[in-house]
Image: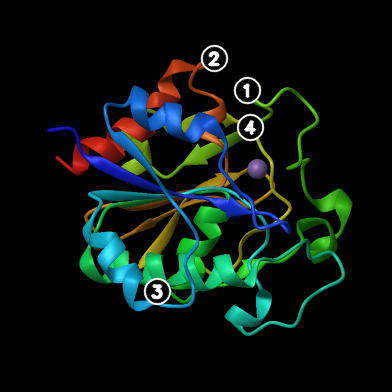
């Protein structure tokens, strides 16, 4: 039986739900059944039941996390936030971690995972330590093109998944993990020191990556491995 991977979605100011189709294709390609999860936030008790309906969770990319949720005031470089989505995804991620349900976070999803577990976020990389101190993490190249290097920690889950400690990835973020949550470790960094991946130490599978593998795998097939790792652990 194919396993069901719930994929969180975005909502815009007109209350239209959106999700990049490449997330769906990536899970389908990995042999999982993609199931799009809408933002629910009024009856949070239903989120626990929602988790019961899926075998694994993929937290998709999107807008910034509200800094008040990790006890920081907003800096001028903060982008759009979606309080309803924050409520939903943070509860979803906390429950998934508590229940040891496999969870993969991509970009915003990596940040949500870290905040859900008690960590913090760099709200805006350029204003955090100056434009010249960091690489370009908002690439202008095609979305499938890899633009910077990440070094994976040896023997980390990601190093095992990819069979290497060296990757080149795409980059579409102006935020990043700052303080890694208790129970998590940073397992990938770009060479300017930005954290590019985190992993739950004791979790069956709790992985967050800052890059967008769903946009890469068609051109760079080794990125299918991360989606396969999520689907396979659900078996
Ligand atoms: Mn990056």
Q: Name the N-terminal-most of marks 4 and 3.
A: 4
Q: Are marks 2 and 4 in contact (CB under 8 Å)?
A: no
Q: What element does badge 1 sit on?
A: loop
Viewer-closest of 6 and 212: 6
The mark closer to the camera, 4 or 1, is 1
Residue ID for mark 1? 144
Q: Name the N-terminal-most of marks 1 and 2.
A: 1
Residue ID for mark 2? 219
Image coordinates of residue 232 in percent, x first then y, are: 21, 36
Q: Are marks 4 and 1 in contact (CB under 8 Å)?
A: yes
Q: Name the N-terminal-most of marks 2 and 4.
A: 4
The mark closer to the camera, 3 or 1, is 1
Whole-number angstrom distance, CA of label 4 to CA of label 1 = 7 Å
The mark closer to the camera, 4 or 3, is 4
Q: What element does badge 2 sit on?
A: loop
Relative to 112, is 134 on the left or the right? right
Q: Is residue 155 visible?
A: no
Label 2 CB-ligand 1 distance < 8 A: no
Neighbours of disc 3 within 10 Å: few (<14), some (14-19), many (20+): few
Residue ID for mark 3? 182
Q: Is residue 138 visible?
A: yes
Q: Name the N-terminal-most of marks 4 and 1.
A: 1
């Amino acid at each position: 039986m194919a396993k069901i991977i719930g994929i969180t979605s975005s909502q815009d100011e007109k209350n239209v739900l959106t999700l990049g189709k490449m997330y769906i294709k990536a899970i389908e390609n990995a042999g999982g059944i993609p199931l799009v999860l809408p933002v629910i936030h009024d009856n949070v008790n239903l989120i626990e039941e929602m988790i019961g309906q899926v075998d694994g969770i993929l937290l998709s990319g999107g807008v910034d996390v509200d800094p008040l949720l990790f006890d920081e005031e907003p800096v001028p470089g903060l982008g759009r936030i979606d309080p309803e989505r924050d409520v939903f995804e943070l509860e979803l991620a906390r429950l998934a971690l508590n229940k040891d349900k496999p969870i993969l976070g991509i970009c915003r999803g990596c940040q949500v995972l870290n905040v859900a577990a008690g960590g913090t976020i760099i709200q805006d990389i350029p204003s955090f330590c100056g434009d010249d101190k960091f690489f370009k993490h908002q690439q202008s190249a095609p979305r499938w093109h890899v633009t910077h290097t990440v070094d994976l920690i040896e023997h980390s889950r990601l190093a095992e998944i990819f069979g290497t400690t060296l990757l080149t990835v795409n980059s579409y973020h102006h935020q990043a993990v700052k303080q890694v949550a208790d129970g998590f470790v940073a397992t990938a960094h770009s060479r300017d020191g930005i954290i590019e991946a985190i992993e739950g130490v004791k979790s069956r599978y709790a992985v967050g990556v800052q890059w967008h593998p769903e946009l890469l795998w068609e051109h760079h097939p080794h990125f299918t491995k991360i989606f396969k790792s999520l689907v396979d652990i659900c078996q």
